[in-house]
Each structure stands twice: as structure tokens, then as C-alpha cells.
Amino acid sequence: MPDFTPAAPPSLPALLPQAARPHAVVIGSGFGGLAAAIRLGARGYRVTVLERLAEPGGRARVHRQDGFTFDAGPTIVTAPFLLEELWSLCGRRMADDIDLRALDPFYRIRFDDGATFTYSGDQAAMRAQIAAFNPGDLAGYERFMALSAETCRIGFEQLGHVPFGHWTDMAKVAPGLARLQAWRSVYRTAAAHFRDERLRTVFSFHPLLIGGNPFAASGIYALISHLEQRWGVHWAMGGTGSLIQGLVRLIEGQGGHLRCGAEVARIETTGRRATGVTLADGEAIPADVVVSNADAAWTYGKLLPGVVRRRWTDAKLARARYSMSLFVWYFGTRRRYESVGHHTILLGPRYRGLLRDIFTRKHLAEDCSLYLHRPTATDPSMAPPGCDAFYVLSPVPHLGGGQDWAAQAEPYRQRIARRLHETLLPGFEQEIVTSRVTTPQHFRDDLLAVHGAAFGLEPVLTQSAWFRPNNRSEEVERLYLVGAGTHPGAGIPGVISSAKVLDSVVPHASALA
Ligand SMILES: Cc1cc2nc3c(=O)[nH]c(=O)nc-3n(C[C@H](O)[C@H](O)[C@H](O)COP(=O)(O)OP(=O)(O)OC[C@H]3O[C@@H](n4cnc5c(N)ncnc54)[C@H](O)[C@@H]3O)c2cc1C
């Protein structure tokens, strides 16, 4: 296991005043962009983060409404040592700024027939749950978790933060991937270990958390089971937005700047070297290095108009597979629902068929599987006293499916409301005091995500590691990419790891000063 003890704060080039340091521009303030800014600041750069929206966080920004706090996106915090590392790079401790609580259980998975699997990090409780579903699967569970641990060791701890800058890097890891049978889908990996169809679902749904189809995502993503068990599932008190605020404060503490309402229209180049950016209002900002945390396909497709692209051509971007999108309904109720846990997965009648509709047919199905988030189960500060904050999320096709969300949003919201009323929240609609929805159009129009994909490029083996847009741009020198569409991929641990890759590929500022 790698050493996760906080690194000693690096010696900043204190000799150079901020204004004399090489300038790094980071486009976008998602978790990946903020983590990149901190790493560049720690390596001696003067850092400017440019964010087109009015507030930082990207998918993790916050909607405040009628006294309720709604985290727009991520709610499940795993591998917290990756965040801790960012604090330690600034010579601080995360615990001084963030109250991170381990959740127990992690979540409940409710099947269509009402049976519920309580998923936790407690091995005895997990075995009891599996025995309640199918005692014959206990041995398979042990084997599955051993495989998950080994996959996590190789796929996450060893390879998650190393640059895949050449095809030979893939060749080097191929034997390891072959040993882990990474070409099998996560579902097939689960099916090889569990006979009970419901347990196959419980141990294969995880890729959905990062935009992958369990029937297509590489078995390597089975590592998430171990990742959760090993380091827990956490909640940041005050919401995920408190982590974003904490990271912004770290950047400011390093002397870096975050500018919101600043949309980058173009990355400027001289020859094939990035030299700065131009904002949509025409302002030119020179830079020694540029890091794009914008959607990777958008970065190549839209932000480099003057560059003839050798690898990420328009044709290749058009052929690429993009992750699903999401429909998210945020609502607050004037009463509390104590029987509903913090994280609930509410499965519909179909698993494989629904995923085929979403990912392959790009058809908006009549049935749905939902993730219900009730942060007030852990953190009453997310709502006014006596109230509950919720969001319910439904995976839906990306905009390539042609759905007209302006027309579909309200009927779809009503369908979800019916489902919640019939299952966990009878009569809840009368209790709602605030409400808003997000559709795939928001991912396209606000976050500038190609096809409104919620997680960038789909995580399949043929779009992983070297096959994904590299963290050091293949097209332009001094241009680097971080975030969900790059290696290693989506999710908070993934995008923070993508920023960690920069330490290996961006020259230290002293080399450019
Ligand atoms: C609803 C939802 C729930 C999720 N739940 C979880 C979870 O529980 N746990 C988990 O680990 N992950 C979760 N994820 C995934 C995770 O949130 C994302 O993978 C991750 O936050 C993406 O970070 P990123 O660094 O790629 O940046 P993003 O969040 O995509 O941010 C990119 C930023 O760049 C800005 N930008 C784009 N173009 C420009 C431009 N031209 N100029 C200036 N700025 C620009 C955008 O406005 C945006 O702010 C969830 C995602 C969603 C959508």
C-alpha cells in the first residue's frame, strides 16, 4: 500500500514574489481543477483558476434555496486521504477546516419487491446480509472481495495517479490487467462470484456512480467495493460544498486566485505550445502552463480552434462513447422522514434492460432506478429546523438520445414522484416547500459537457488510461488536462488523482522561472 501519511509541505520558492513566478491558468473549478491549482501552487506557480459559472465546484457546486442547502452533485466521499493530501501540501490538516464523518451503514439498496440490502463496512453485518439473501453466496463474497482488493491495489493505488503518456505504458500493465480479467464487465465479474441475481446487482452497480454501465465497464471498477470497505464512505458536515470552499481557501492561502464568471473561449498557442487563454469577453490572459478542467471533449473540440489535432480529431470525438446523463430533482419538505437513511438506492423492476435503454438504445424508459439522498439524516444544518433536504437522481440517456427535456422534465419528475410516493415517501408531495430540477440540458448548457454527459467519456476499457485523453495533452505542449474526461476518470477520487498526475508531467515552476 502506498504511504498516505501527509507529505511535508514542499518548500515553496519563497525567494520569488508571486508576481515573478511562472503563471499557471486552470480552466474550470471542479474538484479536479481545484486540486490541480493546489498542486501547481505547491510547485511554485502563480495560479489563476477561471470558472465560467458564478460559483466554484462545477458538478459539486451548491444550490441554496429557501433556507435549504442542496449539493448539486457528489454526496458520497470515498478515499478521503486524497483530499487530506491537498491540505498537507499546504502545510495544513483537513480536520482543522472540515468535519468529515464516516457513515454507517454506507447505503441501503431497496429492490422492487421491497427487500432491502444494507451495505456497510462491517464485515459481520455484510455476511449476515448476504446470508439473508443467499447463504450459498458467502464463499463467493469472500473471493469477490479478495479480487476487489487486488484490483484496487493495482488499478487505483498503483496506476490511478501515474501518467499514461505512451501506448507502451499500456503494454506494461497489460499482464496485470489480464490477470484481473479486466476485459470482463463488472456485472460478469460479479456474476462469476454470486448466484443470486440480487447480489449480482448489489456488487455490480458501482460503475453507475462514475457514469459507467455495469454491463460494459471494465471489471477493474469492481475495485470500488474494496475502496469503500477499506477507507469508508464519508459525509462532509455542511455538505460537499464545504469541501469545495475548503479547497478554494487553500488556493487563496497559497496566493492563488479564483475568478468566477470568467469563461475561456480559446486556448492560445504559438506553434504547438499553449501560451495563455482568451476569455469570452476578449480579455487575453498569458500563461506559462494551461490546465483544462473543462470537459475533455469540449476542450479539444471547441477551445483549440487554431490547432490541427492529430489524435483528438472531430471524427474521433464524434465516435467516442459518452457516459449517461442524469435527471436530478432537489426538494425540501417541511417535515422529517426519520425512516429514510442518508443514501438509498431504489431499484426498479429491470436492471440489464433499463441499462440497455439508457446506454445503448438511448431511450427514456417508463421505469427507473433512483438514488435518493437525504443529507439531513446526518446533517440537520442542510435544512431549516424540522425539515428534510432531499435530492433524487435518475440515470437517463445523454442528449444523443434526442429527448426534448424542455417538454419531458415535468412528466418525468411526476413519474419519479409517483415512485417515491409508492415506496419510501408516501404523500410527500404535500409536504414539499421548495423544489428544482436539473436535466441533461444543464450538463450541456451550464457545464459545457458534450452531449450533456454527466461524467464525460464513458468508462470502458477502450477509453481508459492511455486510451483516454492524456493528462499531458497529446496535441499541444504546456497544455494539461484534469477531470472526469481524463485519466483515471470520474468521481471525486478519480478527478483528484488526475490532478496528482500533474506532479509527474508538469515541470516544476523553478524550471520555467
Ligand atoms: C449528480 C451527480 C452526483 C455525483 N455523485 C458523486 C458522488 O457521490 N461521489 C463521487 O465521488 N462522485 C460523484 N459524482 C461525480 C463527480 O461529481 C464528478 O466526476 C466530479 O465532481 C467532476 O469533477 P471535474 O474535476 O471533472 O470538474 P467538473 O465538476 O466537471 O467542473 C468543471 C468546471 O469547468 C467549468 N468550465 C467548463 N468549461 C469552461 C470554460 N470554457 N471556461 C471556464 N470554465 C469552464 C465548468 O463550469 C465547471 O465548473 C457525481 C456527479 C453528478 C453529476
Image (cartoon, grey):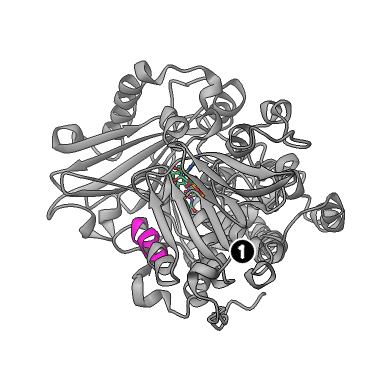
- What residue sits 56% from the left and 69% below the top? 21
| Quadrant occupied by the C terminus | bottom right
- The answer to whether residue 267 is magenta is no
Residue 309 in percent (x, y) is at 74, 35
296 lies above or below 506: above
96 lies above or below 378: below
Front residue of 91/222: it is: 91
180 lies above or below 306: below
6 lies above or below 509: below
| Quadrant occupied by the N terminus | bottom right
- What residue sits 75% from the left and 44% below the top? 467
- What residue sits 57% from the left and 82% below the top? 11
- The stretch of residues the image draws in magenta is 241-247
Q: Is residue 154 shown to the viewer in this render?
A: yes
Query: What amino acid does circle 1 point to?
Result: Lys
Which quadrant of the figure has residue 355?
A: top right
With 342 as the anchor, is 67 left or right in this view?
left
With 115 as the anchor, is 458 left or right in this view?
right
- What residue sits 40% from the left and 21% below the top? 405
Residue 491 in percent (x, y) is at 53, 51
At label 1, counting other C-alpha atoms closer than 10 Å, the crowd grade (few under 14, some 14-19, many 20 or more) is many
Front residue of 90/101: it is: 90
Query: Circle 1 sits on which residue?
Result: 500
- The answer to whether residue 244 is magenta is yes
